[in-house]
Image (cartoon, grey):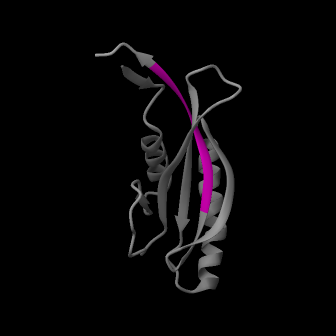
Amino acid sequence: MTVTINGPLPRESLKTLLEAEFPDWNIVTSQRAVDNVDRPTILLKQDTIAALPAAPNGQYAVGYTVTIVDPHQDVELAETALDENVLAVWAVLLTAKATNPKKATKVLFNQYLAYDIETDLWVQIQKGPVR
């Protein structure tokens, strides 16, 4: 069976979108340890795939956590930077086609302040004949 989707893979879509908007930031697209955070960093983690209940069969929500990490060790500086950065990333996600940010939660990433944004990317999957 072959499977096609209605565009690039969700991870690639997010990567392309975020690299275009935040070219000086570190965008990490694989779920791995990041030891040295020396500039604002975004980590992408695919969490879930679920059918869209109100949509026809073949349409799915691919759930991602988009983590925004601030490099400042000083908490005041980190808080101030994150106030702006989380809203900037949220706004970019809102403008993207078939992307639905749902909630941002403040978290710690190693020793750094961060935000996790939960978002869905909608995809349509079509099955084809076995090759």
Q: Which residues are magenta?
A: 116-126
Identity of the residue drawn at 59% across and 56% down:
89
- Identified at 44% across, 18% down, the residue is 127
Q: Which image quarter holds the C terminus?
A: top left
Tell me if residue 43 comes above or below residue 78 in the rendering: above
Which of the 4 image quarters holds residue 61? top right
Queried whether the magenta region covers residue 59, the answer comes back as no
Q: As rendered, which of 25 and 31 lies closer to the eye?
A: 31
Q: Looking at the picture, does residue 35 appear above or below residue 42?
A: below
Number of marks drawn: 0
- Horizontal side, residue 108 vs residue 1: left or right: right
Q: Quadrant of residue 96?
A: top right
**Rendering quarter of residue 58:** top right
Main SS of the magenta part reads strand
Residue 86 in percent (x, y) is at: 63, 62
Q: Closer to the camera, 97 or 100?
A: 100
Q: Nearer the viewer, residue 32 or 28?
A: 32
Q: Residue furthest bottom?
A: 74
Image spot of residue 38 (x, y percent) = 42, 75
Task: State the quadrant of the N terminus.
Answer: top left
Among all residues in the image, which is located at the extreme top? 129
For image coordinates 44% across by 52% down, the residue present is: 19
- Residue 70: x and y, percent? 53, 72
x, y (%) of residue 32? 38, 62
